[in-house]
């Protein structure tokens, strides 16, 4: 059953606030929504699993109501509502996979991810490598890698725009972090 209830509820809410079909961009791929058929179709024809579908639907609902512009201030997952409570699960889902994949890689390998994932906009001069990812329009995410050295182990951090919680709930942001970790891990 899993996400079935959440998906059905999101379709109802989207149908109530939008009267026509919608198109959105997620990680550089276009998705279209057919409200009458309750279908979300990826332009690549790829099947959409339920947990990203909930995220896509929640973004479409927020877009129908009006998405705020990014604040330009970066916050950690812990600073989101109930983020401190959910942080251990978020770290396991979003941060640890990145550390397993890239923690022992040279800086050049991690920096080489820039441009390989649709949505990675550019590299920033923070940490050893910092990628700015346009997950959805107006929903940027920074992923900062600090490579291991003789003194400290590798570390990775995901930062979110301060307005992210005006688009998604904290659980959705955790799912977004997990999806980003999977996508980034698949690139190496």
Image (spheres, rainbow, N blue to C red):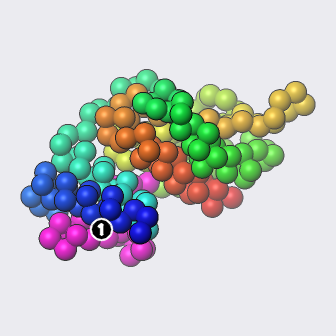
30 relative position to 111: left or right? left
Picture coordinates of residue 99, whole percent (x, y):
72, 45
Q: Quadrant of residue 10?
A: bottom left
| Above/below status of 146 relative to 18 | above
| Above/below status of 173 relative to 162 | below
Residue drawn at 58 percent across, 57 percent down:
182
Name the residue beneath numbered marker 1: 40
Residue drawn at 38 percent across, 35 percent down:
164
| Above/below status of 104 relative to 10 | above
Q: Quadrant of residue 186?
A: bottom right
Picture coordinates of residue 77, whole percent (x, y):
52, 33
Please say whether residue 158 is visible from this viewpoint: no
Picture coordinates of residue 91, whole percent (x, y):
62, 41
102 relative position to 158: left or right? right
Location of the C terminus (image quadrant): bottom right
Please say whether residue 78 is visible from this viewpoint: yes
Picture coordinates of residue 132, whole percent (x, y):
51, 39
Q: Which residues are magenta?
A: 22-48
Location of the N terminus (image quadrant): bottom left
The total number of labels drawn is 1
Please identify the residue farthest to the right as the structure is shown.
Answer: 150
| Above/below status of 64 relative to 46 | above
Residue 121 is covered by the magenta coloring? no
19 relative position to 145: left or right? left
The 10 Å Cα crowd at callout 1, few under 14, some 14 to 19, many 20 or more, is: some
Residue 30 is covered by the magenta coloring? yes
Q: Quadrant of residue 70?
A: top left
Please identify the residue farthest to the left as the structure is shown.
Answer: 19
Indicate the secondary structure of the residue bearing disc 1.
Answer: strand
């Amino acid at each position: 059953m899993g996400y079935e209830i959440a998906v059905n509820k999101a379709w109802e809410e989207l149908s109530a606030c939008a009267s026509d079909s919608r198109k959105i961009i997620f990680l550089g791929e276009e998705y279209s929504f057919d409200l009458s058929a309750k279908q979300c179709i990826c332009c690549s024809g790829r099947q959409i699993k339920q947990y990203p579908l909930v995220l896509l639907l929640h973004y479409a609902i927020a877009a129908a109501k009006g998405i705020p512009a990014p604040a330009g201030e970066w916050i950690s997952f812990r600073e989101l509502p109930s983020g401190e409570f959910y942080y251990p699960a978020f770290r396991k889902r979003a941060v640890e996979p990145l550390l397993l994949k890239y923690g022992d890689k040279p800086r050049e390998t991690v920096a080489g991810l820039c441009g390989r994932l649709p949505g990675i906009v550019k590299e920033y001069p923070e940490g050893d490598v910092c990628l700015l990812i346009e997950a959805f329009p107006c929903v940027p995410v920074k992923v900062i890698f600090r490579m291991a050295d003789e003194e400290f182990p590798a570390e990775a951090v995901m930062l979110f725009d301060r307005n992210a919680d005006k688009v998604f709930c904290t659980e959705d942001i955790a799912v977004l972090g997990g999806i980003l970790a999977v996508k980034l891990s698949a690139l190496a």
